[in-house]
Amino acid sequence: MAKKSSNPNLDPKKFRDSLSSVANDGSRNWVYAKQVNGYFYKYRTYLSWVLLALLFSGPFLRLDGRPYFLFNIFERKFILFGAIFWPQDSHLLIILLLLFFVFVILFTVVFGRIWCGWACPQTLFMEMVFRKIEYLIEGDAHQQRLLNAGSWTGEKIVKKGSKFFVFALFSLVIGHLLMAYLIGLEQVITIVTHPPSENLAGFVGLVVFSSIFLFVFSWFREQACIVVCPYGRLQGVLLDNNSIHVMYDYVRGEPRGPIRHQIPSTGTQGDCVDCNLCVQVCPTGIDIRNGVQMECVNCTSCIDACEEVMVKINRPTGLIHYASENSIKHGIQKLITNRVKGYSLVLVVLLSIFSALLVTRPDYEGTITRFPGLTYQARPDGTISNLYSITLINKTFSPQPIQISVEAEKMKIEIVGNSNWILPPQSKFEGRFFLVKDQATVRIPQEKVLINLSAQGSVFESVQTNFMAPVVTKKTE
Ligand code: SF4
Ligand code: SF4
């Protein structure tokens, strides 16, 4: 018979009724995850070093002086692998996002939550940075439990204080890193090196993001995966019986029971010795033996813990391993299911659309609008002028002179400021110009005109706009 867990949420019959980290009275059930060592933990640690190095070096990577990645949602400017996506490219970004979602769905249907356990920044920082610092300062789960239960001695104040200080320091670093991805490294350096009053919005952003990270990693922790993360909450609809995830082999493990109660070679007892180690190491506080659960982030800690037990009691390893429900129950592992084929097809279609749009993306773009609040200006020399704003974008990697001309009778263009429009590579330019016409030639109050924008000798954009002017009728004697 299964040993009764001290945590009611781990009761095999009731575990789906409540969250393991929330007590029955609604209070927090603090999860003290026991430190784990083992094959998977070792490789997760190595991978985390690589991923953290990539994450932290991202804002420093430069291509022709611009960042490799930028996700400036405030100015709707995005840079992916050095290529700038302007607000005019929103359709490309939407398809890219759809591509990403379909890829994530497809990957999850086949491989479950491997992303969560191995590469998600939340897990990386929580398990590979903050949890390690906590072990270093406060000790393993048992010592942490004792420390929290004990009164505020000098030792507790020092340990808690130093943990808070280091956590705050790392949260500040992560907050600045996120801001560097959002607004660019140069902007972050400017905010940091100038008084807060000079960049108040940026300064507030840094403080808010750093505080959120401190809150998440010091207190909120596994709740971010269980309660907040939409990807985690979607697992119920994404996974099926063929999806691979961390699973307890109940066929081999049950009926479980302490090793001292087992009679060798009778075959009546499963391989699980009910040592509870897989539960003790779980960062979300669940019992993997209850089956696939939304709270499981596939961190593999329970695999490592159980492998150690199996080796010690001289039984085959792999009682908890990467598997699918079907492979455990029926011994069949099917990766290419109809669902997988369907999602793959959608992915290929989206990828083709995206590639076609990317290849046919115009090199230059221009928008022209009438200057807001103005109709026309009557000049002393007898001409009428209208003021316009122009935005030009050069998406190529070379500087480009842009010419402007107007298709309308007896009308000319007067550029405000420097009329030599040479756009640097991958840049945006904003300027103004007048359309000017002799009052004597004005026949209608609102004339439609076509303005041509050219580069390299050919017109890349023709913009239609209005020219407004008063119609003066000649008095008859
Ligand atoms: S660690 Fe392995 S043997 Fe121990 S309770 Fe978990 S599944 Fe059973
Ligand atoms: S059940 Fe195992 S894999 Fe899932 S979160 Fe807990 S320790 Fe990690």
Image (cartoon, rainbow, N blue to C red):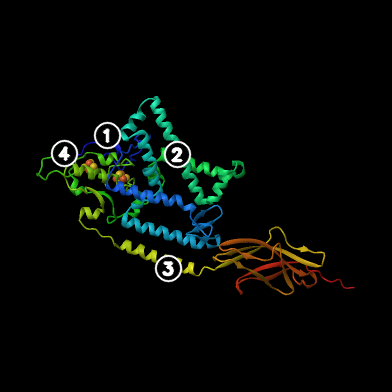
Alpha carbon of mark 2 to alpha carbon of mark 4: how far? Answer: 42 Å
Disc marking residue 215: 2
- Give the quarter the ligand 1 occupies: top left
Q: Which residue is mark 4?
A: 259
Disc marking residue 6: 1
Say what amino acid the circle numbered 1 marks: Ser
Asked if disc 2 and disc 4 are in contact, CB closer than 8 Å, the reply is no
Dot 2 or dot 1, earlier in sequence: 1
Asked if disc 2 and disc 1 are in contact, CB closer than 8 Å, the reply is no
Dot 2 or dot 3, earlier in sequence: 2
Q: Which residue is mark 3?
A: 352
Q: Residue at x 47, y 43 (%)?
A: 173
Going by the image, does 68 lie left or right of 339? right
Dot 1 or dot 3, earlier in sequence: 1
Q: Residue at x 26, y 54 (%)?
A: 324
Mark closer to the observer (2, 1): 2
Dot 1 or dot 4, earlier in sequence: 1
Alpha carbon of mark 2 to alpha carbon of mark 1: how far? Answer: 28 Å
Nearest the viewer among 328 and 264 is: 264
